[in-house]
Amino acid sequence: MESDEVQQSITEQLDKTDENNTLNMAEERVICTHSVQMIFFLLGICCLLPWNLFITAKEYFQYKLSPPLNITGHYDFADTFENYFSFVGSAAILIGNLINVALTDKLSIGVRMIGAHILMIASLIPALALTLVDTSSARLSFFVITVIFMAIGNVGSSVLAGSSLGLSALYPSRCMVLLLCGWSMSGIFTSLLSIFSIWSNHGSPMLIGSLYFTISILYVIVSCVAYYEVLHKSTRQEDQCQLLQEYQEYSINVLRKKMDVVKNVFYETIYYATVLFVVNFVTLVCFPALASLTKSNSDNTTWNEYFLPVCLFLNFNVSDLIGRSVTQKLRWPKAEHGLLVLFAVGRIALIPALLCCNVASRPLVEGLMPDDFGFAFLITVLGFSNGYLINLCTIYCSAKVNDEWKETAGALSAVYQCVGVVSGSIFSFFIARTVLSVV
């Protein structure tokens, strides 16, 4: 009996030794060169670029969805399309992330990443084709088709985002920070594109729409090629797909079932899941549907044209990028500190604060915050706190679990965020409809 116990003890020690050796050898192959860091940044931009182009191409969609002047009594999607885009797009993102988590042990990271790029391109090409078609007599059909292809593209984007987060979790934390900063940079890029289209003032809405979607398609292609050449085929890293497969095989051998892996990681990261949910919920309630109802109180017609592109979209994304970048040097509060939840819950105050602004050209609460500066300040706080808290909790989430679960933790952190995004979009949808009916 004693000899059996001794033999079992020796076997367990040898298994642990083999496990550590495998993980250490795998980590040695993960080399975070400057080119690898750049690719993570480019992937981050690609994850949200198509979505940001959809929500910032406002002039194009208002032109396509506005009814002719001689037609009355029809529902005007031009005023509410952002609500539908946010709701359907968020639901598609959640579905895509759930698919990505389910496929982590069935498809290699390379197949998922390249497949996501292809799915995004396949959804953007029809959107580009619609910019060349006169849909004035079929506005509802155009709207439905656009929403469907936007949803398909968001599924691809979410698979790419979840897979990229899982991959970045195997690298030093600065790679994850750069990936998440890329998310903000995509918003900045599309905001600048929107401002440029207003400044140029020679392009028709149809031309602006075709420009947006053409740039998006080209960038997704560049991102796919860059990923394949630098990460997927990297000889210094000896094939990232094999590395991830080693992690996944080890996970399956220990726990036997993928669901057990997900449950274990979820219980380990439940604290950060709560914070990520609340942060994304508040952000999507406020941005973009509710905040885009705000109008400038200035009498300057030129500034009125730039008000939302500058004070809302560009301001939010720049603030978000600054917040994400700060986490490279400053990580406070510490992991699992109560202030994380306090900060996340405190952001709820931004919802009624935005309703006190100049919503739909008439303040709901007269005189509290009608000026443009107050609105811009609230958006700055919303963007900075969003980027800072999301980056901080995403990094803590991956650091919380053992090395063999980091890829799953990275994918799950995307799911936590998407649940908050979908819930916030639903809530925002009804708030925006209520505000429009009141004002």
Image (cartoon, rainbow, N blue to C red):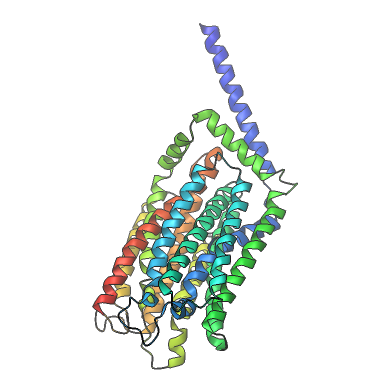
Q: Position of residue 325 (x, y in %)?
A: 54, 63
Note whether residue 174 is visible.
no
Q: Position of residue 207 (x, y in %)?
A: 57, 80
Q: Position of residue 119 (x, y in %)?
A: 57, 56
For the image, the number of numbered tags is 0
Note whether residue 50 is visible.
yes
Using residue 147 as the reference point, say whether residue 355 is left or right of it.
left
Residue at image location 49% in from the left, 65% down from the top: 323
Which is nearer the eye, 136 or 246? 136
Above or below for 79 versus 147: below
Residue at image location 60% in from the left, 55% down from the top: 175
Residue at image location 43% in from the left, 87% down from the top: 304
For this orientation, the residue located farthest to the top is 1
Which is nearer the eye, 101 or 57? 57
Residue 19 falls in image quadrant: top right
Q: Position of residue 250 (x, y in %)?
A: 57, 32
Using residue 27 as the reference point, say whether residue 296 is left or right of it.
left
Above or below for 187 versus 398: below
For this orientation, the residue located farthest to the right is 235
Residue 204 falls in image quadrant: bottom right
Using residue 8 as the reference point, say whether residue 18 is left or right of it.
right
Q: Quadrant of the C terminus?
A: bottom left
